[in-house]
Image (cartoon, rainbow, N blue to C red):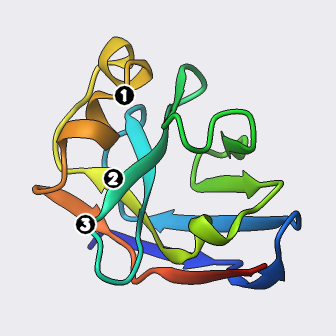
Amino acid sequence: QVQLVESGGGSVQAGGSLRLSCAVSGYTYSSNCMGWFRQAPGKEREGVASIYTGGSTYYAGSVKGRFTISQDSAKNTVFLQMNSLKPEDTAMYYCAAPKFFVPEGLCGGGFFVKFVQDNNYWGQGTQVTVSS
């Protein structure tokens, strides 16, 4: 059984930082694309960043230069370091892993976080609130 468990959310003031973690277990792909999504109240879920195992990364324009996605050496935890947070970053943040293989080229081009919402494994989410 695949499980994704996010942690690290919280409340910060604008300009602050948070580091989200996603612990993954039971995932059968040794190499694949993984990503972070977020959903603000009243808005659609949007892709934030993706990473291919040990390789390419992709960032949405709204977070590029402020957020960094990474993985640990054992490849079973994905992180999202969020710096210079803004009130518009307030949302529930979700970690996701696809139920199918996403090649590195597509992952680095943002295919996973831009076009794939269905057919994923999802975590329960962690709330990030940024006050002005």
Q: Amino acid at mark 1?
A: Gly
Task: Determine whether the residue tagged by mark 2 lies in a helix, strand or loop.
Answer: strand
Q: Earlier in the sequence, mark 1 or mark 3?
A: 3
Could you say which disc has been placed on residue 110 in the image? 1
Q: Amino acid at mark 3?
A: Glu
Residue 127: quadrant of the picture = bottom right
**What residue lies at 19% left-to-right and 39% top-to-bottom?**
115
Say which quadrant the C terminus sits in: bottom right
Which of 92/130 is in front? 130
Q: For this view, does 1 lie left or right of residue 92? A: left
Number of the front mark, 2 or 1? 1
Q: Are marks 1 and 3 in contact (CB under 8 Å)?
A: no
Number of the front mark, 1 or 3? 3
Q: Position of residue 95 (x, y in %)?
A: 44, 63
Which of 31/78 is in front? 78
Q: What residue sits right under mark 2 in the picture?
A: 97
Q: CA distance from mark 3 to mark 2?
A: 19 Å
Q: What residue sits right under mark 3 in the picture?
A: 44
